[in-house]
Amino acid sequence: MSAAVGLNLAVAGLIQGLLIALAGLAVSLCFAVARFPNAATGDFMTFAAYAGVAAQAWTGSLLAGAASAVLLTAGLAVASYVLVFRNFRGRSLVAPLIASIGLAFLLRSVLTFFVGFDQHSFHVPIARAIVFAGARVRPIDLWLAGTSAVTLLAVLAVLFLTPIGRRMRAVADNPELARASGIRARAVMLTLWTLIGACSAVGGVMLGLQTVVVPEMGWNLLLPAFAAAVLGGVGNPTGAVLAGIALGLVQALSTPLVGFTYQTAISFILLIATLVLRPQGLLGRAEPVR
Amino acid sequence: MSLGVHGVNKSFGGLRVVDDVSFQVQAAELTGLIGPNGAGKSTLFAVISGFQPADAGCVRFDGHEIQRLSAAARARLGIARTFQVPRPFAHLTVRENLLTGARDQPGEHVFNLLCRPGVVRQRERQIVARADAMLEFLGLTRVAGERAGALSGGQQKLLELGRALMTEPRFILLDEPYAGVNPVLIEEIERRIRTLSEQGTGFLIVEHNLPALARLAARLLVMDRGRLIASGTPAQVLADRAVQEAYIGGGP
């Protein structure tokens, strides 16, 4: 492939990677603190995209649409914790995992019941692509990449630089000792689900802006998101972000070799290979010894 | 201020591990809890600190019944506990491990983070200063930035004690604080416990190092096979026939 084609693919891959990183971060946060793989993450994203389209249609502003999507999806995530996942505290991860799959189908059914299967899309002003060293970049893509990167950094900053983040990591590390330290589980879990919702929402709106809004859009991103969470080391949010970006790049750059249709298969192969060969993830975070 | 258990029972399967135990411990009277392995001491600690529900009986702290409170709520009320085998927050740094114990952190609320960053920062500075003083006391300053999982067993033991102290407890349950700690440090910890005790903090200490515990404690409670079999001053208790039989005789 020529350098320009390669560069174009790399740019597309980077944006795709940032999207996967957002979804992967939401999955990884949930796994680290609430201790189960949340299969509803993709449908949180779908919900956010629809909420964003609706709010944009209502207010006429893309920014207001995106902000409403983040607020509503954070609310949805918190509600799903309060109504569903909170009841599985202290149980094995099978029960909440199955419940999250159920929640995923429920969300999609409710969405399609109200909005049908038609494609929707955000209204984005048409602008000329910027050509840089042979790579064509749409201005919207720069916004997508920038917003995704800022969101990823903001979530990691909350996790690693604030007292509530420290408490979240403490609960993730050793729930029993966290109780002995008097850490309020409820405050931690509400913050966790707000972050999961916000992260999924930004991912969903970005995904919707990039292409179109359809009921399966989030579900289709779930496999790469899980792959990123596993590749980065289960329960290691920073690893999930780096792995997500890497995965997007690998998927895009492999397009000339395997074709567009089989992109997702790469995620699947990497996911299985990691689980078999290096279950602690590429960044090698071992689970705490019990 | 006092901590008391009244008619506490706890069984696992068919085995009654804590059998109708009642006692009251005054904060002013540093108390040791001894007994052979399997006597039910750690289980009793778990019941008092809220990690195991009692099958029957009640736990009183400062005049209030607390057996319905969660373990975290009891910790915030001022009852700290350490674990016999410490398992720190392995991925957090040593300093962060101590910081988790500090209470009244405005930064645990998103609202404060966004709207009152000054308050959060100021309190955070105070907490960090307190954690650093604790690190200094425990001799862990050199490893403050390292992951707690990388510490030696003895260092983890000290960190566990420090984390409990960081919660500003009014009453501390220590589960074998001296096990695996070198003798010089044992004296240091002893001094620290004595100082805190004189300042009004209550202590209930499970420890197999009887000479060290006898030096420290004003009163000893003795458990054997789930029951409380003796209580009194260390001299009285160690001279007690039933206690000697429980320790030496062993048999049924």
Image (cartoon, rainbow, N blue to C red):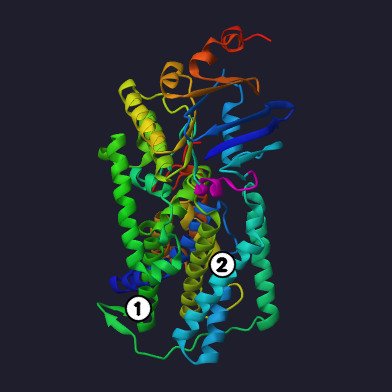
Q: Nearer the viewer, residue B118 or B239?
A: B239
Task: Look at mark 1 in the image and give the residue it sits on.
Answer: A142
Element at badge 1?
helix
Residue B115: image quadrant is bottom left
| B227 vs B139, nearest the viewer | B227
Tell me if residue A169 is in the magenta stretch. Answer: no
Mark 2 vs mark 1, CA separation in Å: 23 Å
- Residue B83 is labelled as none
Q: Amino acid at mark 2?
A: Gly
Q: Is residue A219 visible?
A: no
Local secondary structure at mark 2: helix
Tell me the number on the disc at residue A42.
2
Instruction: Name the chain under label 2.
Output: A
The chain letter for the residue carrying disc 1 is A
Where does the image place residue A138, in percent across and percent down from the top left? 36, 82
Which stretch appears magenta?
Answer: B67-77
* Location of residue B197 with respect to A208 vertically, above or below: above
Amino acid at the residue labelled 1: Leu
Q: Residue at x 32, y 67 (%)?
A: B118
The rendered magenta stretch, by its main secondary structure, is classed as helix
* The quadrant where residue B43 appears: top right
- Same subunit, labels 2 and 1: the answer reads yes
The x, y position of residue A153, in whole percent, is: 36, 65
State the image coordinates of residue A201 (x, y, percent, origin top left): 50, 72
Total tally of numbered discs in the picture: 2
